[in-house]
Structure formats: structure tokens, C-alpha cells
Image (spheres, rainbow, N blue to C red):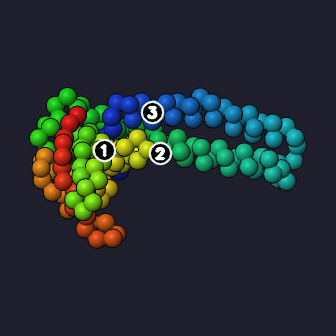
Amino acid sequence: MSQISYYTAEGLKKLKDELHEMKTVQRPSISNQIAEARDKGDLSENAEYDAAKEAQGLLEMKIAKLDSIVAYARVIDNTNIDNSKVFILSKVKIKNVANGMEMEYMLVAENEASLKDKKISIDSPIGKGLLGKKQGEIADVQTPNGIMKFEIVEISR
């Protein structure tokens, strides 16, 4: 059974666009490759045909998986998020207690995480450590190098 996963409206749109591209562009392209390879004759020794059939199988698996993810996806309404504590979709400014370095991240679902965009997963060690904390609190985050302490400087939306 698939499980419900939560997305921003932007994240869900990106998934749907990817699924649409797979179904309307990649699927017909692979079908054409199979047809061309089939026209070349003997299928038992046709490497192009075998490769195209394998690519088709992989694409169909990806489409089925993405279909399932989209079916169980829910969009998070961030208008009702309480800014007094850190929740999913909170923008959090944190300060490393050890070195005073400040960072700002948005907590998002696992599949939307992107360090480049300053989005971290609520399932990551830092995300788990920050969830439920209030401004001014210290979050103890378990990392491979030991426990790091982060002060919650600011919470916004």
C-alpha cells in the first residue's frame, strides 16, 4: 500500500509535469524506436529492439511509480501554519551554537528537499531536530560526527 506524502503546490506541479512528459513525449518516442527496430527484420538477434523494449519496461515502471506517488500526494496549505513552532513549510533561521554561523532553511517533504534551494527534509537529522521547536530554543541534532546544537533564531512562513 502506498503512503500519503505531502508537497508544496509547486512540488506537486513539478511531479505532475514530469509524469505528463513521460507519458506524452518519452512513451511515444520509445514506441517509435521499437517500431523502427521491428521493421529491421529478425527480432531474435536485434539488439536495438531488445534495448528499446528494456527502455520501455523501465519507463513504464517509472510511470507507474510516479502515478502512485501523485495519487497519494497531498498539498500542504501553508496559510494556517503556526509560526510559533517549527513545522513543515516553516522557514527557519538557525545558528550553530559551536561556531555562531547562521543558516536559513525551509523544511519540506523528503522528495522536495534541495540544499541548493535551501530546502531540507523534515526526515533529515537537522529537520527532525528542528521540528516542534520554538524561537530561542536549542535543537540537539544527531549527526555522524556527534551531536550539534542549533539555536532557533527566527521562524517564518
Could you tell me residue 13's position as x and y percent? 42, 30
Decide if residue 29 is on the left or right side of residue 154. right
Q: Which residue is mark 3?
A: 14
Q: Amino acid at mark 2?
A: Lys
The structure residue drawn at horizontal position 16% and vertical position 31%, both measured from the top left corner, is 80
Q: Is residue 149 visible?
A: yes
Residue beneath the point at 13% across and 37% down: 82
Q: Quadrant of residue 156?
A: top left
Residue 143 x %, y %: 31, 66
Residue 65: numbered disc: 2
Q: Could one spot residue 129 in this view of the protein?
A: no
Q: In the figure, is residue 135 to the left or right of 67?
A: left
Kindly report which numbered mark, 2 or 1, lies closer to the viewer in this rendering.
Answer: 1
Disc number lying in front (1 or 3):
1
> Residue under circle 1?
105
Locate residue 138, reporting x and y percent.
Answer: 15, 57
Q: Estimate the spatial distance between the alpha carbons at disc 1 and disc 3, rounded to whole Å.
A: 20 Å
Figure quadrant of residue 139: bottom left
